[in-house]
Image (cartoon, grey):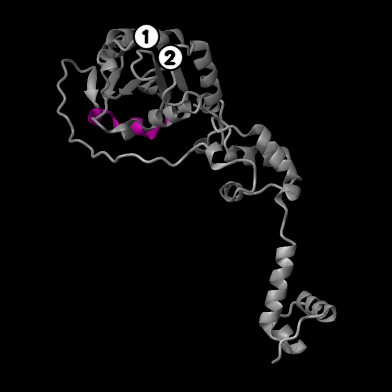
Amino acid sequence: MNYKQLNEEKKAQIDILLAQGLSMRKTAEILGISHSTISRYKNNIYKKRKIDINKKYDIFLKYLYEHYDYRFCSIEICVIKFKKSYLLANCPSVKQVYNWVNEGKIKLTKKDLCYKKRKGKKTSMMNHTKWNFDHKTVLPISLRPKYINKRDELGHLEIDSIIGKRNEFDSIISIVDRCSRRVWLIKAEYKQEYYIANLIYNYIIKNEIIVKSITVDNGLEFKALGIAAKKLGVKLYKCDPYCSFQRGSNERMNALVRRYLPKGTSFKITTQIYLDDIMFNINSMPRKIFGYKSAYDMEIEY
């Protein structure tokens, strides 16, 4: 079959036959041309009619640029909120927006996203340490009751410290409720264990935080925290060395705090008022794990 370029008449015939539901092969048979010719013709039309996302999703993109904040309002949250607020406007899927970012089709770049790929050395888990304790207030995490893992009641706290700039004593103590994922942040000017224990105890009493158990790591700053636990009348459970996953809620929350206070930030000029603002933003942030409810909402439900 000699190749002939499609003229306008043939193109119109192809469009009519395909619109009637005929396949490309059947259409080619009727018109006496190759079905691959029809396929190339349709592909060219598709390329010419390729959607301009800036026109189709102009309302969404404007909303995204105004509301997206990698610290507390992710792309997924923007999509969810946009769907609720603009019922008739075109809204892409979350995956589609990430594809646009990866392909460089919108103003957001990979550097603007919440998570960035980072390389690090893999550390092997050390063998569990045999714990020596003088009284039953401080216990290894292996003795923590299994019902605490269900996360169905308030008061089971995880406590950790966030380190600031190297060679500085200032740090931040983060307290997270395992059930509601609510966080409290405390400015600490020293790392002395009795100072930290007293600071945490006074903060819990002042803010009337519900406490039923406390889980911490092996940091030296928490060496005297058993005294605070004893005064609060609760058990203190210590994680195994190099097992940060045993305080998963705490580690996840620290990552959220780092969006506001990146590694290397000096905490000397960080005030408690600013930490309170960070707490409010995080605790009011919609969380996917709760069906896009905030920590405050979950605390009310429980």
Left or right: 48 in relation to 204 = right
Residue 6 in the image, given as x and y percentages of width and height: 78, 80
Q: Amino acid at mark 1?
A: Leu
- Amino acid type at image mark 2: Ile
Crowd tier of the residue under label 1, counting other residues whose Cα lies within 10 Å: few below 14, some 14–19, many 20 or above: some
Main SS type for the magenta part? Answer: helix
Q: Label 2 near label 1: C-beta < 8 Å?
A: yes
Residue 293 seen from this side: yes
Image height of 19 relative to 206, above or below: below
Which quarter of the figure has residue 220?
top left
Q: Is residue 145 magenta?
A: yes
Measure the C-alpha gap from mark 1 to mark 2: 8 Å
Q: Report the residue at 44% width, 42% height from top.
A: 117
Residue stretch in magenta: 141-152
Q: Position of residue 124 (x, y in %)?
A: 23, 40
Return the residue at label 1: 199
At horizontal 68% and vertical 76% (from top left) the residue drawn is 39
Could you say which is closer to the camera, residue 297 or residue 198?
A: 198
Question: Which corner quadrant of the image does residue 284 belong to?
Answer: top right
Residue at position x 37%, y 21% in the image: 163
Of all residues shown, which one is farthest toward the bottom? Answer: 1
Is 220 left, or right, of 252 in this rendering? left
Q: Is residue 175 above or below residue 106?
A: above
- Which x, y percent locates residue 282? 52, 26
Q: Secondary structure at mark 2?
A: strand
Name which residue lies at 37% across and 9% down. Answer: 199
The numbered dot on residue 186 is: 2
